[in-house]
Image: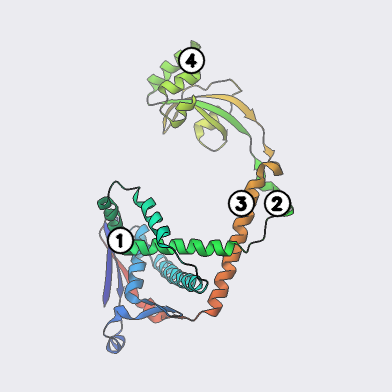
Amino acid sequence: MFRKSLLFAGFTISALILLSSTSCTRLSSPAKRVVVRVNEAEFSAEDFSLALAQKLKSFNSLSAKDVGVISQAKATVVHDFIVQTLTQDWASKNEIFVRKEQLDNEIEKTRKDYPDDSTFRQSLAMEGLSYEEWEGRLKYMLLERLVIEKLRSSISNITSEDVSKYYQEHKNEFLQPAQSRLRQIVVDTEDAAKKIQDELRRKRSFAELAQKFSKTPEASKGGDLGWVERGTLEVFDQAMRLGVGQRSNILRSPYGFHIIETTARRPAKTLTLQEVEKQIRRTILQEREQALYSRWIEEQLLKAKVFKDEDLLNQIRVQTRGP
């Protein structure tokens, strides 16, 4: 038996290789056996077990024991290894490499988010990663980005006709619901809200009171929430029944006590082609990129030599210990 354990969120995930007696007589080191091979790249049982434990770290201890979750996690780990190997092989053949300065710049950008090197390395340890493993992942991410940029260069230009056709075929997606422009003052207690109500009755400026007393981020903008549609928050829905220029009574929500004013309304409408042209161009580009990438992966798989030891993969089990 081989075990690879990692501690995540207060509980331990262990990936174990449980081999039959005949398997053990053939190989004394099951951890070194190959579970997946893609061309010349090999994925050992030890590395697979570590990757599996990493993949399961986002689940709680109960979910990490679920047979379906484990099966899907195993499939994802295998798929990721295959795609990563195909990407690296293709990049090498096409002379696409991550330059040292590119990697150094990306490392520096990431480490700026931490106060010091010790804190940064502690965060890696909590994720079950060594610095070398993290750097390797970062380098692959940059390589993948370069490969995608290379593939993207073959995508045809998006024409005005493409945009117009997409708009006509998806016009129902560009319906903008009725909206109200709201501003609000939010405080922690009902007594505080009543005092603000009194000030408003004395014709004090709503915007000034919001800036002075409201605790929500839009206070700096005089309480202006911008355009709001129904379903955003229950108290907003109540306020949207008001006419333009009217204020609500004190409304309570999990965020506190609200006084809301409707400053404008606009009816539902279908956005024009000009209003959504940039959005459509982004959508078409994303769709073409995804289709191109899918075709590219299929082409690489057809050319690759892929081996999977299904028996060994099935013998890898997961255990958890802790809360």
Look at the image and tell me in which quarter the C terminus lies.
bottom left
User: What type is the residue that disc 2 sits on?
Assistant: Val
- How busy is the neighbourhood of tag 2: few (under 14 within 10 Å), some, or many (20 plus)? some
> x%, y% of residue 79?
46, 70
Q: CA distance from mark 4 to mark 2?
A: 49 Å
Q: Which residue is mark 4?
A: 200
Q: Which residue is mark 1?
A: 131
Q: Which residue is mark 3?
A: 282
User: What type is the residue that disc 3 sits on?
Assistant: Arg
CB atoms at circles 1 and 2 under 8 Å apart? no
CB atoms at circles 1 and 4 under 8 Å apart? no
Which mark is first along the chain, 4 or 1?
1
Is any part of residue 59 visible from this angle?
no
User: What type is the residue that disc 1 sits on?
Assistant: Tyr
Q: Of 68 and 182, which appears nearest the observer?
A: 182
Mark whose residue sits in front, 3 or 1: 1
User: What type is the residue that disc 4 sits on?
Assistant: Leu
Q: CA distance from mark 1 to mark 2?
A: 46 Å
Look at the image and tell me in which quarter the N terminus lies.
bottom left
Q: Of 22 and 273, which appears nearest the observer?
A: 273
Secondary structure type for disc 3:
helix
Q: Which residue is mark 2?
A: 163
Which mark is first along the chain, 3 or 2?
2
Q: Residue at x 41, y 65 (%)?
A: 69
Is any part of residue 48 visible from this angle?
yes
Q: Quadrant of residue 154?
A: bottom right
Mark whose residue sits in front, 1 or 4: 1
Which mark is first along the chain, 4 or 3?
4
- How busy is the neighbourhood of tag 3: few (under 14 within 10 Å), some, or many (20 plus)? few
Q: Of 131 and 199, which appears nearest the observer?
A: 131
